[in-house]
Image: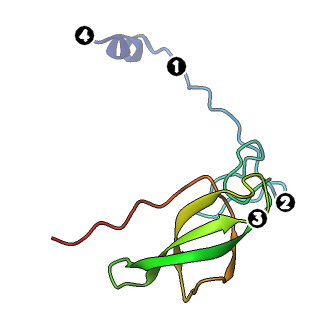
């Protein structure tokens, strides 16, 4: 017989597991919207706590994406922590050489476009 079955026979009350409390922002007693988690100020994502960086387009390599809606570009960062760094990025929308763009984060670089078989 399992340990839980013995506890049921003996008439012992069930032990409830302690759940950590999550503080919700907003009105006291307000229920969170379905699928929405509590905001955690200690976790920072792209664009949180870091300023946006300006960049200039140096070269447009080509188009990528299932329908060709994304441009693969080479750009030089003009401001921010990585000033002067040249990176490859994927950019959605119309773009040409010498356009200035705003990057929310500058750490990621796009992979090179591979040719079709």
Mark 1 or 2: in front is: 2
Could you tell whether 73 is left or right of 4 in the image? right
Label 1, label 2: how far apart the Cα atoms are: 35 Å
Of the numbered discs 3 and 4, the one sitting upstream in the chain is 4
Q: Residues within 10 Å of mark 4 (few under 14, many from 20)?
A: few
- Left or right side of 5 for 56: right
Q: Could you tell me residue 108's position as x and y percent?
A: 56, 55
Mark 2 or mark 3, which has the lower sequence index?
Answer: 2
- Which numbered dot is residue 27? 2
- At a point 76% along the width and 51% down the height, the residue shown is 24
Q: Nearer the viewer, mark 4 or mark 2?
A: 2
Q: Which residue lies at the image location 62% right of the left edge and 76% below the top edge?
A: 57
Residue 76: name its quadrant: bottom right
Q: Residues within 10 Å of mark 2 (few under 14, many from 20)?
A: few
**Front in this rendered view, residue 61 or 63:** 61
In terms of secondary structure, where does tag 2 sit? Answer: loop
Residue closest to the eye, 99 or 19:
99
Q: Which residue is mark 3?
A: 52
Residue at image mark 4:
1
Work out how far the residue at label 1 is from the one at label 4, CA to CA, in angstroms.
18 Å
* Whole-number angstrom distance, CA of label 3 to CA of label 4: 63 Å
Q: State the image coordinates of residue 115 (x, y, percent, origin top left).
A: 25, 70
| Image location (x, y in percent) of residue 83 | 75, 57
Instruction: Return the residue at label 1.
Output: 13
Q: Is residue 31 above or below residue 43?
A: below
Q: Secondary structure at mark 3?
A: loop
Name the image quarter holding the N terminus: top left
In the figure, is residue 101 to the left or right of 8? right
């Amino acid at each position: 017989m399992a340990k839980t079955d013995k506890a049921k026979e003996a008439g012992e009350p069930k032990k409830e597991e302690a759940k950590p409390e999550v503080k919700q922002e907003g009105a006291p007693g307000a229920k969170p919207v379905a699928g929405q988690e509590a905001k955690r100020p200690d976790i920072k994502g792209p664009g949180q706590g870091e300023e946006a960086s300006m960049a200039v387009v140096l070269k447009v390599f080509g188009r990528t994406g299932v329908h060709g809606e994304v441009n693969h570009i080479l750009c030089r960062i003009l401001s921010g922590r990585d000033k002067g760094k040249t990176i490859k990025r994927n950019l959605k929308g119309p773009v040409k050489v010498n356009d200035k763009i705003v990057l929310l984060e500058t750490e990621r670089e796009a992979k090179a476009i591979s040719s079709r078989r």
